[in-house]
Image: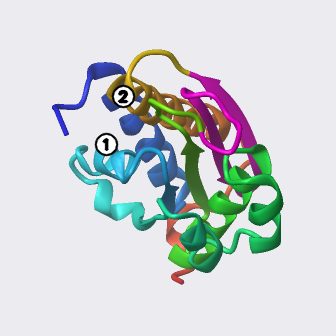
Amino acid sequence: MSEIDEPTRAAAEQLLQTCRRRGLGLATCESITGGGIGWALTSVPGASDVFRGGLITYASELKARLAGVDPAFIAEHGVINERTAREMANGAARACGADVAISATGTAGPLGQDGTAPGTVWIGIRTPDGTTAHRLLAGGGRAQIRRAAIRRALQLAAGTLQLCGPTRPPESRDVR
């Protein structure tokens, strides 16, 4: 991957700082971004004190096996949708013992997938307050779409966590 751009770095730093301040562990479950969200997070010095790790579930079967996405749902609806993004985020939190998790599933093209146009990305955000999903419609080629998904996922996670209710202080954080 190329060097991280400033808006992506700023979002990663903000998210890590918020997790650190609140004593929260962070994880990822990535498909379209292929580990790029984790790469952006670990580009920031000191990320290891909150970033627990991540799952790269590029294959649909791994979304079910590793992240716990319902295989019957995948068979009927595919993997590029709100529910899959939510389940991937919840699965990452569970698998990595984290309080906060980010997921990304979508298609970067040049062809669509599951009847979904290239540039469609669903981003899941799990916080102690619950799990949400957001749709991103990105333009450009594969690299541009993937970079946009990484940046937007970090921005959404940082913003969502800012709105999240109070959490326990770092000294009382459970180790999982």
- Residue shown at the point (64%, 58%) measured from the top left: 89
Q: Secondary structure at mark 1?
A: helix
Q: Can you identify the residue that label 2 sits on? A: 8
Please give the range of residues in magenta. Answer: 113-137
Q: Residues within 10 Å of mark 2 (few under 14, many from 20)?
A: many
Disc 1 marks a residue whose amino acid type is Ala
Q: Can you identify the residue that label 1 sits on? A: 40
- Residue shown at the point (47%, 41%) measured from the top left: 15
Magenta-highlighted stretch: main secondary structure?
Answer: strand
Q: Residues within 10 Å of mark 1 (few under 14, many from 20)?
A: many
Does 11 sit left or right of 70 as displayed? left
Residue 28 vertical position relative to residue 150 in the rendered view, above or below? below
Estimate the x, y position of residue 12 in percent, counting from the top left. 39, 38
Estimate the x, y position of residue 142 in percent, counting from the top left. 38, 29
Q: Is residue 136 magenta?
A: yes
Does 14 sit left or right of 62 as displayed? left
Disc 2 marks a residue whose amino acid type is Thr
Q: For the residues labelled 1 and 2, say whether their Cβ atoms are less than 8 Å apart.
A: yes
Q: Is residue 11 magenta?
A: no
- Whether residue 69 is visible to the viewer of this picture, yes or no, is yes
- Whether residue 163 is visible to the viewer of this picture, yes or no, is no
Q: Secondary structure at mark 2?
A: helix
Estimate the x, y position of residue 58 in percent, counting from the top left. 47, 59
